Amino acid sequence: MNNILQKTSKTINWINTHLPVLCVSLSIIAMLIAGVIYKVSIFHPLKRIAVEQAEYDEKLAKLKNQKEMVKRHLKLGKSFLDNSRYKAAKREFNNVLNLDKMNPEAQMGIFKTEVYEYMRGEDYIPEVVERQIEFILEEDREDPHALVLMGDLYASLDNMAMAEGYYKKALKSATETASAYFGLGIIYQKQNKTEDALKMYKQAVRLSKWNEHYLDNLAYLYLKKGDYRNAIENYQLILTLDYEFLLTYCEIAIAYWLMGDLDMAVRYQDRLVSLINDDNIAKLDKNNGVWFFEAGREAVSLYSIEEKRYYALLSLSVTHFLSGRQEEADKYAQEAKAIEIATKADIKHLVLFDLHRFKDKHPAYSNQIERYREL
């Protein structure tokens, strides 16, 4: 009996001493049996960890890329706001919300574009716009886009002192805000500060080199100064960028007119009449803005397409008359006469002012000009 107890004790002691080795050995034997009989990989737990790690790394990479794309779309959207490209800005902010549904910067960006759209709409109420802009400024008193919108608001109310102050605040906040330079240029142009306006328009174009509105105002000032070459160069660039921007045809024709190149003038005027008679083009948003002209000490603004068409037809009639084409001159004069608008006298005054400028530059046409004035 003692013998059995001794042997049992020795066995237990041996097992206790070699237990770790036995456990490892049994685990190896079990894994080998599982691998041979059941085709189970002994490295499966390690593989699972590796897969989970790879999935986690992939999610991190996607999240990083998403954040980077959000950042880039926001930056692009803000740059479009700087340059008065509100539709393009809205698209970028919507792209952000597709990636990050609750992004506050994108939501505010879209709100800014909607304020701008509302200002241009038929239901525009200045008090509503002011409160909407204040809503933006409550978050950031130096938001350059909100300050430009406030400048636009006061400019629309003909309070140029307040408008100028807000545009300058916008530039103090962000010197790359091209729309603020443009707003200042319009103010100085209306105040007959031609050199100051020219400086502002140049800055706006420097920051937004293909903005047709900035280029058009810059070209118009060159035209006013008698720098016809620079005016034509800028007008031609606009038409290269957008051949449907109708105001440009009108102004480039005047530039050629004043240079004495009636053939080029009539070419652009004829193209203008053709395009303005196409309702699909005439009704585009870019052609529905106000056409503002200076006629000596007076200003003539054309609002409706019919007013713009009337001016285009009369101008084309004049050019044909000065070129000795009486039949064509009569044809377009009659087409103009058939248009029923209340502002004919103002537009005739503008055409006569154009004729006066042409006469000063080219006195050889004085007799023809007087004949047309009589007609």
Image (tube, rainbow, N blue to C red):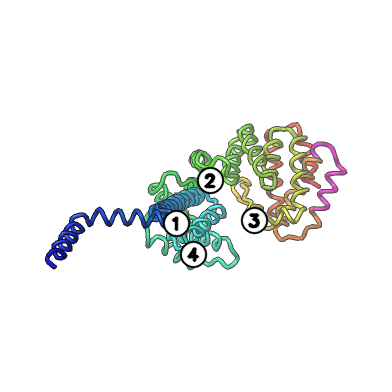
Residue labelled with disc 1: 40
Drawn side of residue 280 relative to residue 108, left or right: right
- The local secondary structure at tag 4 comes to helix
166 sits to left or right of 360: left
Report the residue at 77% width, 35% height from top.
263
Q: Kindly identify which numbered label has been placed on residue 129.
A: 4
CB atoms of marks 4 and 2 within 8 Å: no
- Dot 1 falls on a residue whose secondary structure is loop
Between 370 and 178, the one lying in front of the other is: 178
Rendering coords of residue 167 (x, y %):
44, 50
Instruction: Name the amino acid, label 3.
Output: Asp
Q: Secondary structure at mark 2?
A: helix
Membership of 79 in magenta stretch: no
Classify residue 273 as left or right of residue 38: right
- Which residue range is magenta in the image? 321-335
Q: Residues within 10 Å of mark 1 (few under 14, many from 20)?
A: few
Place residue 338 in its image quadrant.
bottom right
Q: Nearer the viewer, mark 2 or mark 1?
A: 1
Residue 58 visible in the picture? yes
Near mark 2 (Cα within 10 A), the count class, few <14, some 14-19 or many ≥20, is some
